[in-house]
Image (cartoon, rainbow, N blue to C red):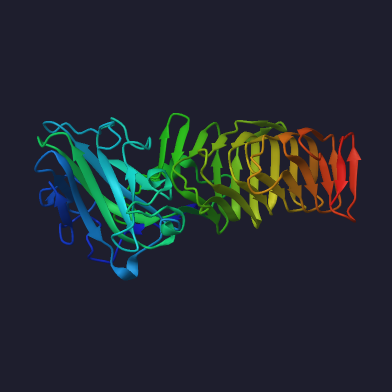
Amino acid sequence: MATIVDNYVIAGAPGDNFDCDSTSGWGKGGNANSPATQSNRIEGNYSLALQTSDSGISYWYHDISSDYRFKITEKDLGLWFFYIKGKGDNYLVQDSSAVVLRLYFGGTSKYADYHLTEKGDLSLDFGWQMLMCSGTELNGGSVGGGHNGGSDFNLDIYRIEFRLNAANKIDRNLGLDAIFIGTSLEIQDGTESDPVTFYDLEDYTSYSRNGFPIGTVKIDGKLVNIKSSIKITNNGYLFEENKYLLFNQLSPEVKHHIKIENGTFKIGKLENNKPVNGCQIVKPENKNADIIVNSDGTFLCYNSKIYRWREIKLNGTCDLNYVDFDNCDIVKFNSINNKIIDSTIHDSKNDISSYSCEIDKDLDKFENVYIYNNDNGVLINEDCLLEEVKIQDSNNYDLSVLDGKTVSLENSNFSTIRRV
């Protein structure tokens, strides 16, 4: 039977009140009233009600116990909140400076701000909203207090603070609940006839699996908004078709992946040997994430587009049929069980390699692949056969072959070939 698990937990030490069931440990400053509890909640018995006493800046903060501090470059920080304005109307404002999450790094002198209503995460939706903060996108990647970003983000988070910039003091509240940390959802067990789907992941993340919901998968029609890494292990089986899979809110650090360790990820299907019902698998621009297939993993992808991913590492069994790799850094074929046919690899970003793809094994099949608009075309590191492969518009070399290796070409012609 297919199983879903995760690694998300309430932040801080037990009793630190990051579950927001109590006001203990929460301080205040500026024009803030003392924090209070309220029965409108996501989990537990209460949530926090944070109210201003006057116009201007109000803030509430909680330090993290030393043994439970974490790095934002390694774990995501999630929380549930709503912003109340007016006479109990429960909605969020669009002013980008209205609600700010401030994280302090290594102490109280270095901090960075996350403008909650600026990131596209929050809108005028009613009810509780989940924010996922996942890296150095904090305020454009700068750390305040006279410090720049970069290495400061590798310091442990010392304090979590919420700041409210109220235009006036009438009935303005910030409701806060379930502050949690973690990175991934994990699929275990399952078969082709009994797989996990993203509907299952949405159901799982929307209820209180460990005492609180995480809300990292949301489906609206064909759009699937995903704010977790996905790991498939212990013979897990994940299947989806006819969806736009948006891996949103990923970080500039490479800590997020679709990782197939031991199991299967199937996208679309074959009907009468024709690829149909595929998906678009997309990540935001300037966010880094990889698709990794380990040697015991299986990736079956049909009639689909894979867009803007950093590195595609195919070490296991892979069947790619009518797949468009667009704006990915590089696709690495590392297994004799790799098969790609009737596909395209183009407009590679070339941030980590000047090649659009690398072939490190004699693949099962590399046939009718169109590669174009790259710095270089293909790097060949092993004897292999290329059938009906076309490479064009490479700035330098269409084909680069490791010295001593042989490439057999059938109906494949390249204008520039070199030995490396």
**Residue 287 in view, yes or no:** yes
Q: Is residue 212 visible?
A: no
- Residue 352 versus residue 90 in the image, above or below: below
Q: Which residue is nearer to you in this view: 151 or 83?
A: 151
Taking the image as shown, residue 224 lies to the left or right of residue 112, namely right
Q: Residue furthest bottom?
A: 67
Number of numbered discs overlaid on the protein picture: 0
Q: Quadrant of residue 120?
A: top left
Q: Between residue 97 and residue 146, name the one nearer to us.
A: 146
Q: Is residue 52 above or below residue 346?
A: below
Residue 178 as seen in the image, left or right of residue 234: left
Q: Residue 108 at what x, y percent from top left?
A: 28, 60
Q: Residue at x 88, y 55 (%)?
A: 403
**Picture quadrant of residue 9:** bottom left
Q: Nearer the viewer, residue 123 or 321?
A: 123
Q: Position of residue 153 (x, y in %)?
A: 42, 57
- In percent of width and height, residue 65 lies at 28, 67
- At 62% from the left and 34% from the top, the residue drawn is 304
Q: Is residue 332 left or right of residue 418?
A: left
Q: Position of residue 15 (x, y in %)?
A: 22, 65
Q: Is residue 212 left or right of residue 373?
A: left
